[in-house]
C-alpha cells in the first residue's frame, strides 16, 4: 500500500510537472504568438504606409501628367462635332474648380492642342487629322462653335459680348481690315520665361468684356513646327468664324505664305540674361521634385549651377555655333517632354525653314525684318507699363482696359508663391554672358528701342 501510495505520488508529481511544463510552453507560445502578431501588424502597417506613399506619389505624378501634358486630359475634341462614330455632344466637367475656360474655349484649346499632339509620336489612331480629312474637320469644328454661340445668343444665354461673332448683322466696333490683316484674330507669340501669367489671365478676363474667345496653346514641347503644321494651324485659325485671341509657344507662322490674311501678331520679350537664369533654375526646380519619375533627375544634372554650365561650355549654356537646334536630340535633354536644353528668343520669331543654327548674323537681321513687317506690337517684360499702353492704343479691340485689370490682378498675387532660388550673378559673369549671347542681347535692345519709338508715335497720333 505504501509502495502504491509512493508510486501514485510520483505519478502525480510527474503529471503535475508535465502540466507545469506544458503550461510554461503554452505561455511561451502565447507570448511568441503575441509578439509575432504585433510584429506582423507593424510590418503590415509599414508596408501599407510605404505602398500608400508610393501610390500617393504615383497619383501626384499622374495628376501632373494628366493636366500639364499637351492635351489636358484624354477626351477627343473631335467627338463633339460628331465626326467619330456619331458620338453625342456632351458637356464635360472641368478638370478642377480653377479651370476657368468656357466650354467653347475648352473645345478650341483642345482642337489646337490635339492637332499638334496627334502629329507627334502617339499610340492613338485618329483619322480626323489626316491630310485628306483635316479640311472637313476644320470646317465642321468652326461651324459647330459658331452654331453653339448663336444658339445661346438667340436664347439670351450668351455670357460673352456677342461682338465675337464676326457677322455683319451683329454690332461691331471693328474697323475695315487693312490690306492682308484680319483684325478679328490675335496671335500672341508667348516667349517661354518671358511670359507673365497675370497678363494672360487679364487678357482672358477681357474676353468677356471685349468679346472674343481665348485659346491658350498648351503644347509646351512644340517649339518648332513644320511647314505642313504651320499651314494647318493657319487654316484652323483662319477658319474659326469667331473673334479669337490665340496664345502659342511655337515659332512664327507666315499666314500670307498660304494665301491667308495675317492676324494681328504680338509678342513680349525680356532680358536674355534674366531669361537664361529663369530657364536654367526653373527647369531644375520643376524636375527635382519628380526625382523618382524622371531618369534625368537621378543624375547630377539638376544639381549643376549656371557657373558650372558656363565654365564647362556645356551645350545648354552655349550659343554661337550650336547647330540643328530643332532636332530633338539637341533641343531636349531627355527622350520625352523633359527639361529643355535649347531655349532662346530669336528662333521663335523665325519661320519653319529658318534659324536652324544659333549665332548667325543673317538670322538676326531676318528676325528684325519679321518684327518690323509682321508684328503689330513687340513689348518687353521690363517695360510692362509702356507695353500695356501700346497694346491698348494699337489693338483696342482686344486690349482696351487691359492695364487696369492687369494691375488689379497683380495686386492680388500672393507674395509667398514657392519657386526656384535664382542666384544673383556677378557683374563679371553678366558681362561674359552678354558677350556669349551677343545676338540675343542685340535683338532684345532692338525690340526695346522699337517699343519706345512705337509708343512715341502712338502718343503723337492721339494728340493730333
Image (cartoon, rainbow, N blue to C red):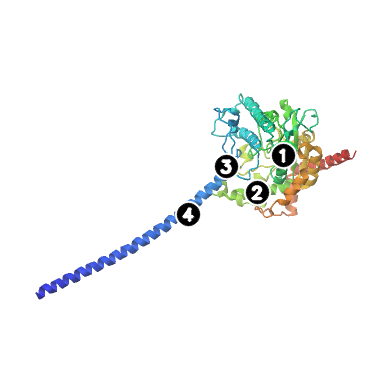
Q: Nearer the viewer, mark 2 or mark 3?
A: 3
The numbered mark at residue 66 is 3
Mark 2 lies on residue: 282
Q: Quadrant of the N terminus?
A: bottom left
Q: Secondary structure at mark 2?
A: helix
The residue nearer to you, when weighing 2 against 71, is: 2
The residue nearer to you, when weighing 434 against 278, is: 278
Disc 3 crowd rating (10 Å Cα; few below 14, some 14-19, many 20+) is: some
Q: CA distance from mark 4 to mark 1?
A: 48 Å
Q: CA distance from mark 2 to mark 1?
A: 33 Å
Compared with 384, 132 (above or below) is: above
Q: Nearer the viewer, mark 4 or mark 2?
A: 4
Q: Position of residue 105 (x, y in %)?
A: 66, 36
Tell which circle, 2 or 1, labels the residue nearer the N-terminal end.
1
Q: Secondary structure at mark 4?
A: helix
Mark 4 lies on residue: 49
Residue 78 appears in the picture as rendered: yes
Residue at the farthest left position? 1
Q: Quadrant of the C terminus?
A: top right
Quarter location, residue 87? top right
Quarter location, residue 154? top right
Residue 395 appears in the picture as rendered: no
Tell which circle, 4 or 3, labels the residue nearer the N-terminal end.
4
Q: Secondary structure at mark 3?
A: helix
Residue at the farthest front position? 155
Tell which circle, 4 or 1, labels the residue nearer the N-terminal end.
4
Dot 4 and dot 2 residues touching (CB under 8 Å): no
Q: Position of residue 213 (x, y in %)?
A: 70, 36
Q: Position of residue 100 (x, y in %)?
A: 65, 42
- Residue at 20% x, 68% y is 15
Compared with 222, 436 (above or below) is: below
Amino acid at each position: 500500500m505504501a509502495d502504491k501510495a509512493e508510486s501514485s505520488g510520483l505519478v502525480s508529481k510527474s503529471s503535475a510537472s508535465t502540466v507545469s511544463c506544458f503550461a510554461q510552453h503554452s505561455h511561451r507560445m502565447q507570448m511568441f504568438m503575441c509578439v509575432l502578431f504585433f510584429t506582423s501588424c507593424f510590418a503590415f502597417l509599414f508596408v501599407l504606409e510605404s505602398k500608400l506613399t508610393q501610390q500617393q506619389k504615383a497619383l501626384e505624378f499622374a495628376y501632373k501628367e494628366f493636366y500639364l501634358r499637351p492635351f489636358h486630359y484624354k477626351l477627343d475634341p473631335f467627338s463633339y462635332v460628331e465626326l467619330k462614330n456619331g458620338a453625342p455632344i456632351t458637356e464635360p466637367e472641368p478638370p478642377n474648380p480653377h479651370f476657368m475656360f468656357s466650354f467653347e474655349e475648352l473645345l478650341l484649346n483642345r482642337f489646337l492642342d490635339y492637332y499638334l499632339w496627334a502629329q507627334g509620336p502617339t499610340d492613338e489612331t485618329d483619322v480626323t487629322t489626316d491630310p485628306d480629312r483635316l479640311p472637313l474637320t476644320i470646317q465642321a469644328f468652326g461651324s459647330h462653335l459658331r452654331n453653339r454661340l448663336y444658339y445661346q445668343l438667340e436664347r439670351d444665354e450668351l455670357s460673352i459680348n456677342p461682338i465675337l461673332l464676326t457677322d455683319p448683322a451683329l454690332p461691331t466696333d471693328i474697323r475695315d481690315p487693312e490690306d492682308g490683316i484680319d483684325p478679328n484674330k490675335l496671335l500672341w507669340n508667348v516667349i517661354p520665361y518671358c511670359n507673365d501669367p497675370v497678363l494672360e489671365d487679364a487678357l482672358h478676363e477681357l474676353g468677356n468684356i471685349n468679346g472674343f474667345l481665348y485659346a491658350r496653346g498648351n503644347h509646351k514641347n512644340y517649339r518648332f513646327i513644320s511647314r505642313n503644321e504651320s499651314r494647318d494651324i493657319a487654316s484652323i485659325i483662319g477658319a474659326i468664324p469667331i473673334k479669337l485671341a490665340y496664345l502659342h509657344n511655337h515659332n512664327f507662322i507666315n499666314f500670307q505664305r498660304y494665301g491667308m490674311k495675317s492676324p494681328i501678331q504680338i509678342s513680349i520679350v525680356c532680358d536674355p540674361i534674366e531669361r537664361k537664369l529663369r530657364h536654367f533654375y526653373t527647369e531644375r526646380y520643376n524636375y527635382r521634385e519628380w526625382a523618382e519619375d524622371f531618369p534625368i533627375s537621378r543624375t547630377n544634372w539638376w544639381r549643376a549651377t549656371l557657373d558650372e554650365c558656363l565654365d564647362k561650355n556645356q551645350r545648354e549654356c552655349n550659343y554661337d555655333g550650336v547647330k540643328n537646334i530643332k532636332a530633338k536630340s539637341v533641343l531636349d535633354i531627355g527622350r520625352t517632354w523633359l527639361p529643355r536644353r535649347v531655349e532662346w528668343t530669336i528662333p521663335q520669331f523665325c519661320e519653319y525653314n529658318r534659324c536652324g543654327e544659333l549665332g548667325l548674323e543673317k538670322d538676326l537681321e531676318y528676325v528684325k525684318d519679321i518684327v518690323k513687317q509682321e508684328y503689330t506690337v513687340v513689348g518687353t517684360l521690363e517695360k510692362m507699363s509702356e507695353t500695356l499702353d501700346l497694346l491698348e492704343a494699337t489693338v483696342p479691340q482686344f486690349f482696351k482696359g487691359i492695364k487696369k485689370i492687369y494691375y488689379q490682378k497683380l495686386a492680388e498675387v500672393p507674395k509667398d508663391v514657392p519657386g526656384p532660388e535664382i542666384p544673383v550673378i556677378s557683374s563679371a559673369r553678366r558681362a561674359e554672358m552678354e558677350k556669349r549671347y551677343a545676338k540675343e542681347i542685340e535683338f532684345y535692345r532692338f525690340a526695346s528701342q522699337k517699343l519706345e519709338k512705337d509708343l512715341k508715335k502712338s502718343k503723337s497720333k492721339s494728340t493730333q
